[in-house]
Image: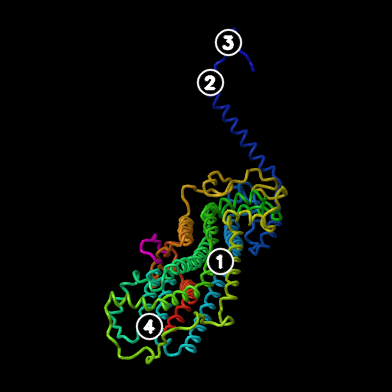
Amino acid sequence: MIRMSSGIKRHEVSPERVMLAAFAGVCFLSVVRVSSAEDLPAVNCSLVKDAYTSLGFSPADVPNAETPGGLPQVCGPLKTCCNTVMEEKFNQRSTRDFEKLIDDTSEELRNTFMTRHKRFDGFILELLEKTEQSQNEMFIRTYGKPYMQNAEVFQSLFADMKRYYTGGNVNLEEMLNDFWTHLLERMFQLLNSQFVITEDYLECISKYMEELKPFGDFPKKLKSQVTRAFVAARTFVQGLVVGREVANRVSKVTMSPACIDGFTKMLYCSYCDGLSTLKPCKNYCLNVLKGCLANQADLDPEWSKYTERLEGPFNIESVMQTIDVKISEAIMYMQENSMQLSHQVFQGCGQPKPSGMSRTARGVPDTFSGRFSPYNPEELPTAAAVSRLDRLVGDIKEKLRHFRKFWSWIPEGICQEENVAALDGDDDCWNGVSKGRYVPEVLKDGLTHQVNNPEVGVDITRPDALIRQQIAALRAMTNKLKNADDGNDMYFQDSDDDSSTSGSGSGGGEMCVTESDSFITQAPHEEAEKRDEASSASIIRSSLLLVLSPLVVSALVLR
């Protein structure tokens, strides 16, 4: 530091001299920058041409000598053997490469949902078909005409159950209540065939259903178990459908212009400098991918909750194993208390007129021997089916555990591929400018962390609308799965409405969530998808067939 003596006169510096000095400095820096660019080793454009044509491009695109810096906007800050034509083709190529990488990386996830949903649905459909066929054959063979005369009660229940599962506006609990009421009416007529039972009289009987409790507490207990099982099964399948749709839609990434530029620079700008054999540095690759997939990474919190909830309890197996016994006990309960029940009905509804024909004359026995047992053990399809169902559900749960952090994992999954980026710690790589170590730090995942992404410009104030719709879909599905786990159903529009994808709920007081296109995305559903979901509906119906098998037999026994 130079100190000025108070005895020495200080010189005045004119503004003109200041401006002259500044101008000289600028000129000096310009000379230094130009000279540094000129001092760079010349690139052999013939080598660039060879590498360029190896990608399938025309050699005529490549200039014979280096072009001035700035002509290719992404790959040409300094002199380069590339031009705007080459850069545009690099952009197109990198866009296809990026889309294929995302598609390949997400293929296992998408296939998991597709194949597991298909297996699960196929198993239930097979079980449904075998159970219904076995029941029908057994009932006709065992009970003949009496069964066929009352079969519409159960056929109606099957139809309503199917409509419930496939999206119909059906109240599950009310439907089961109606079934027990109709069963009571048929059984009462069978047990009191010596009387003329009119429609008005049957309506009177139904009014006393709660008070009479002809089947004891079995309908109440069974309603709770069946409702929980069916809601769980239907919601489980719906959850697989939602996961499949979200995975399919999010995997179709629309690249922003900044992402295209960043990805092009990472993969192909090294060709312009004769460094085509260099792979991008791994950390460089990570920052590019994190910038391009910033919105996708934001799916992870809701996706993780969704996959975790999809692993919730699935108790339809235990219900299927015990439903026939419980309904049998309900039937037996009414039989054992038929005299008292008839007396109570006569007190409340009056004494019906005699039919003039005794029970024996009409072929109705006074007592029923044995307990309810409609199938031979080898004919019952549930023994092997239950274990297979358990394996199917367990397989789905195990697979989904590996995908809990899938969307934020994609950059790592792509950049760890040997054909995409250099190995971690390898500094002999392309850093976006030259050969050497990549200096910037790797950013965290998600949109808000990309505000200072050095490779891809990201507007953190404008979240992707499609991704936000998928987040909303996952949140709604997670809530629905939670409600199903608690035994509560949620309402859905009728399947005849094009916006519906699956079954309706059982309670008007339940939370109303419509699984329409807007529930998932604004994209319309395809017919194939509708058929797939209609097929899934058979899951509940098949379970119910096992539930209803005892009911059918019970009614026939009463004949």
Q: Mark 3 vs mark 2: which is more N-terminal?
A: 3
Q: Mark 2 vs mark 4: which is more N-terminal?
A: 2
Quarter of the view holding residue 440: top right
Contact? badges 3 and 4 (CB < 8 Å): no
Mark 4 = which residue? 191
Mark nearest the camera among 3 and 2 is 3
In 3D space, how far apart are the residues under numbered discs 3 and 1 (Cα atoms)?
A: 88 Å
Quadrant of the image for the C terminus?
bottom left
165 left or right of 430 in image: left
| SS at mark 3 in the image | loop
* Residue lying farthest to the top in this orientation: 7
461 left or right of 376 in image: left
In 3D space, how far apart are the residues under numbered discs 1 and 4 (Cα atoms)?
A: 51 Å
**Label number found at residue 9:** 3
Majority SS type along the magenta span: loop
Identify which residue, 391 or 204, lies in the foreground: 204
Contact? badges 3 and 2 (CB < 8 Å): no
Mark 1 = which residue? 113
Instruction: Please give the name of the residue rendered at 37% of the width and 74% of the height, measured from the top-left corner.
Output: 178
**Label number found at residue 14:** 2
Q: Position of residue 282 (x, y in %)?
A: 66, 51
